[in-house]
Amino acid sequence: MTTRLERIEVPDAVAAEERARRVVLAAFAVREPVPRPRRRRRVAIGVVLAACAVALAAASPPGMAVVDRVREVVGVERSAPALFSLPAPGRLLVASDSGVWVVGTGGEKRLLAGYSEASWSPFGRFVVATREHELVALEPEGDIRWTLARPAPHGARWTGTRTDTRVAYVDRSGLRVVAGDGTGDHLVASAGRAPVAWRPGSAHVLAYVVADGLHVRDVDTGRVLARARSPLRTGLHTELEWSADGRRLLVVDDGVVLVFASDGTLLTRSNRESGRVIDAAFRPRSHQVLVARFRGGGQSTVSELESGRTVFSGTGVFDEITPSPDGRWLLVEWRTADQWVFVRLQGHRVIRAVSGIAKQFRGKAVVEGWCCAR
């Protein structure tokens, strides 16, 4: 039943609604996100939205209309209520508050409880994961192969062939490397820090950051193959990634994208005027870089670094972006909307969205990797 109060005409209602709309969108612009290490990033923009929604709801009926309108534009409207399947072959590793999840192509999920982060071994046969004071190699079904006690290990990455592999990780002593069977653990750099990135190929070549900048080292011989001191700002990088052919190295550092040649020569640097970089990734089997940016005014985009072509955009803040192993799809983590959005990169543009991510993974979820194309 409509009350007398609700029937009262609010003076200047249209203008009030417009002012309220600007308040909500300005809240996004004021909070410019600061990149953090990849698996530790947690965006609080939802709190900002909730606070604005409460304020608008209490303010006026026009304010309530604006809240409804903002809810409509944050997220893909036609989204699946659950992750029924992946649009491309492979399996996901997802870290959440409840542990690490292995997600199959058909949407089946297995929880590896007690782990805070993880990454795939070459060819996706095993997983390397960490917990409070332990590095663990296990099968995707959960069976443990070996463990290594170390103080606060994190940032583990696995590389190699089917018969000869290495795992790099960081603990309180610095950057360390251990063989894929858990033997031969040793210190590589006392000042090393996560993230790290293995160059594709049979040689065990690792990119990492120390006090004087970026290093590329053959961990078997100890030889430093390349260095880049400038314009890196040590400690502010959030992503290191090699192209599939090992000829390019991508670095996200202090909100910009840097692309280096394998010898350390800087080839490309993104423009800050285009927005603050949140994440970036090579498109598989290419040198094309996809970049997620926060552009201010409450908007985020994913675009191609060189051409600037927009792949996807939306209200709020995106987190990580992860290409499928076959390079046909891109997974965009839209934290503000609590959605994953799959965008087809080849052929006719198609978008598939999944809602309720936090509920499905029992907490805030971060994609650790998508592996592997058969």
Image (cartoon, grey):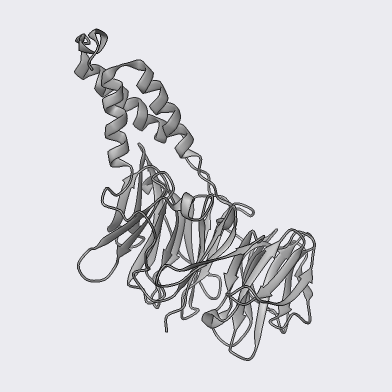
Q: 241 or 266, which lies in front?
A: 241
Q: Quadrant of the N terminus?
A: top left
Q: Quadrant of residue 174?
A: bottom right
* Residue 360 percent location from the top left of the image: 47, 55
Q: What quarter of the picture does the C terminus occupy?
A: bottom left
Can residue 215 be seen? no
From the viewer's perspective, tell me whether residue 4 is left or right of residue 199: left
Q: How far across and down, in percent of the image, does residue 144 sit?
A: 69, 75
Q: Nearer the viewer, residue 263 or 130?
A: 130
Q: Position of residue 126 (x, y in %)?
A: 60, 78
Residue 133 in the figure: left or right of residue 26: right
Specify whether 299 is left or right of 249. Answer: left
> Which residue is situated farthest in the bottom direction here?
163
Q: Residue at x 31, y 23 (%)?
A: 20
Q: Nearer the viewer, residue 235 or 331?
A: 331
Q: How many circles with numbers are drawn on the protein? A: 0
Image height check: is 143 above or below 352? Answer: below
- Residue 309 lies, in percent from the top left, at 27, 58
Q: Is residue 7 visible?
A: yes
